[in-house]
Image (cartoon, rainbow, N blue to C red):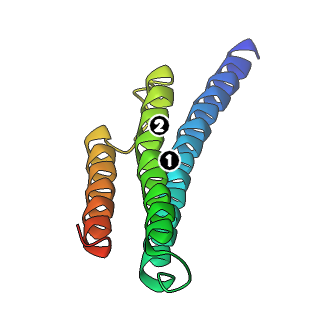
Amino acid sequence: MGKKKNVLAEERTDLAHERTFLANERTFIAWLRTGLALVGAGLGIVKFLESEGPDWVMRIMGLLLVITGEASYIFAYWRYNRIRKKLDYEALDTVPIWLLIFITISVLVMSVVSGLVIFNW
């Protein structure tokens, strides 16, 4: 009876680790999604609302939103990696860290390039 309880306890612990890793991945993606929304809003303000007020005000508002969005990409990766290191559990099949680095850098570079194009810099 004691052996069966031990096996169940280990299985529950393994499942809890897996849920935690999955939650960490969902949070990473949520931060990326938030960053994309901020960058999109910043670019949209500059592109579509430039006639609504002084040009420099719209550009500053747009630039602040783009910078905030890009900061959220960096924060997403930093947070994901910090929690991943705390929970380093080799039995789980997790997303490779190189892929998350690639995704983060790709989104960051594309945001910078699109910002440069929209802001005419």
Residue 11 - label? none
Residue 80 - label? 2
How many other residues sit within 10 Å of disc 2, few (<14), some (14-19) or many (≥20)?
many
- Looking at the picture, does residue 121 appear above or below residue 102? below
Residue 78, horizontal then vertical, whole percent: 43, 34
Left or right of 120, for residue 95: right
Whichever of callouts 2 and 1 sits on the residue coming sooner in the sequence is 1
- Looking at the picture, does residue 18 appear above or below residue 40? above
Q: Nearer the viewer, residue 67 or 61?
A: 61
Q: Nearer the viewer, residue 46 or 95?
A: 46
Q: Count every numbered label the image shows and give the total.
A: 2
Disc 1 target residue: 28
Q: Residue at horizontal 50%, vertical 24%?
A: 87
How many other residues sit within 10 Å of disc 1, few (<14), some (14-19) or many (≥20)?
many
Q: Residue at horizontal 56%, vertical 47%?
A: 27
Q: Residue at horizontal 64%, vertical 33%?
A: 16
Residue 53, horizontal then vertical, whole percent: 55, 78
The kind of residue tagged 2 is Tyr
Residue 97, horizontal then vertical, whole percent: 31, 39
Left or right of 10, for residue 54: left
